Image (cartoon, rainbow, N blue to C red):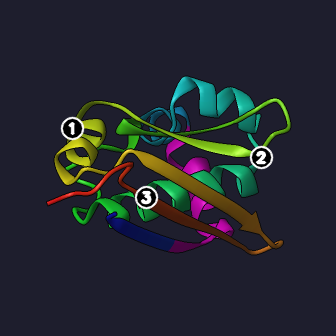
Amino acid sequence: MKLSTGVDLVDIARIRAAIERHGAKFIARIFTEAEQRECGGRFASLAARFAAKEATAKALGCGIGVVSWLDIEVRGDENNAPHLYLFGAGAQTAKQLGLSIWSVSLSHTESLAIAFVTATSDSEVS
């Protein structure tokens, strides 16, 4: 089995400043419509998802650029537990690496947001 991890820590004030400076343009470039709805403009929630996207790119071993911000989505389930979804280049890169089982954990304080992402294969990878 293959295991890959990524972690990222984000200053919530940095995300808030970017949103206040660039507004809807920044939000639309970074967050999917579903993420925007779920976060409802809460800076800490947006920052945690930003961190999750960075952590996912690290787990993919490529960084943002090879995969886009919108290739990675974090949505809550019926209990508001976060789940990770990959699209486009994100899904393609994960498939090439044999990574098919993903887990994401989000947390924040008043000033910092953190995300930890793990990915594994569901079978032996050569």
Q: Determine the image quadrant of residue 106.
A: bottom right
Name the residue type under label 2.
Arg
Kindly identify which numbered label has been placed on residue 50.
none
The answer to whether the residue labelled 2 contacts the one labelled 1, judged by CB atoms less than 8 Å apart, is: no
Residue identifier under label 1: 92
Mark nearer the viewer, 2 or 1: 1
Q: Residue at x 64, y 32 (%)?
A: 36
Position in image of residue 62 (x %, y %): 22, 62
Position in image of residue 97 (x %, y %): 21, 53
Relative vertical location of residue 96 with respect to residue 35 in this rendering, above or below = below
Mark 3 and mark 1: Cα distance apart in space: 14 Å
Q: Is residue 14 magenta?
A: yes
Which structural element holds mark 3?
Answer: strand
Name the residue type under label 1.
Gln
The answer to whether the residue labelled 2 contacts the one labelled 3, judged by CB atoms less than 8 Å apart, is: no
Q: Tell me which segment is drawn in magenta.
A: 8-23
Mark nearer the viewer, 2 or 3: 3
Kindly identify which numbered label has been placed on residue 42.
2
Q: Quadrant of the N terminus?
A: bottom left
Q: Is residue 60 magenta?
A: no
Q: Is residue 5 left or right of residue 13?
A: left
Position in image of residue 52 (x %, y %): 53, 57
- Please report whichever mark, 2 or 1, sits nearer to the chain's N-terminal start: 2
- Please report whichever mark, 2 or 3, sits nearer to the chain's N-terminal start: 2
Residue identifier under label 3: 119
